[in-house]
Amino acid sequence: MRLEPRFAFVLASGRGVCGYALAALDSERFYENFRTQWLPPLRAAHAEPTGDPARWTPTQKIYYEFHHPRIYFPASLRNCPSHLHIDLLPRAQGHGWGTRMMWVLLAALTAAGSPGVHLAMSARNIRAARFYRKLGFVELERTGTGDASTIYLGRTLS
């Protein structure tokens, strides 16, 4: 939200926040700002863990990611330079909120001049794959194997 506030949307109910949709207009610029603006304060506040990684706590594993971020933006995604993330709690799923949030986010990216958007998802998530296909997303790339496989989907914007 800090790096791309104009593409940050939150879904809330009487019980509080139950979802969000976020995007970055230009992934290359976003990742550069992530490395140069977002990560340095986190690295300064949280030392890189040492010792046997098999014995690290979940928090230490996150701190390791601050010092060794995994950023994936290959040539196959360049025609869809924006990227997005959406998550809804179970209580908000199945009521059309995800579709409505996606249309709002896609409209905002289109209005800002994005030619296309991509996202990553687990190949195991069949429900999400159906959801994105209905919104016009197509598979651009697949990485990993088996349960560790990730699918990159993209959609052109007009």
Image (cartoon, rainbow, N blue to C red):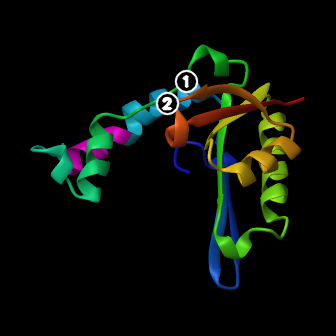
Query: Residue 134: where, in percent of width, then height?
Result: 88, 45
The kind of secondary structure element at disc 2 is helix
Q: In the image, is residue 68 part of the stretch drawn in magenta?
A: no
Gap between marks 1 and 2, in whole Å? Answer: 9 Å
Can you name the residue that lies furthest to the left here? 51
> Quarter of the image holding residue 26?
top right
Query: Residue 108: where, in percent of width, then height?
Result: 79, 43
The kind of secondary structure element at disc 1 is loop
Q: In the rendered image of this protein, does residue 149 appear above or below residue 100?
A: above
Residue visible at 50% across and 27% down in the picture: 72
27 lies left or right of 68: right
Can you name the residue that lies furthest to the front here? 146
Nearest the camera: 36 or 27? 27
- How many dots with numbers? 2
Contact, CB < 8 Å: mark 1 with mark 2? yes
For the residue marked with disc 2, what is the amino acid? Tyr
Nearest the camera: 14 or 143? 143
130 lies left or right of 60: right
Task: Write down the residue under mark 1.
Answer: 73
Task: Write down the residue under mark 2.
Answer: 31
Question: Which residues lie in the magenta part?
Answer: 39-46
Query: Residue 148: where, in percent of width, then height?
Result: 50, 40
Foreground label between 1 and 2: 1
Badge 2 density bin: few <14, some 14–19, many ≥20, Cα 10 Å? some
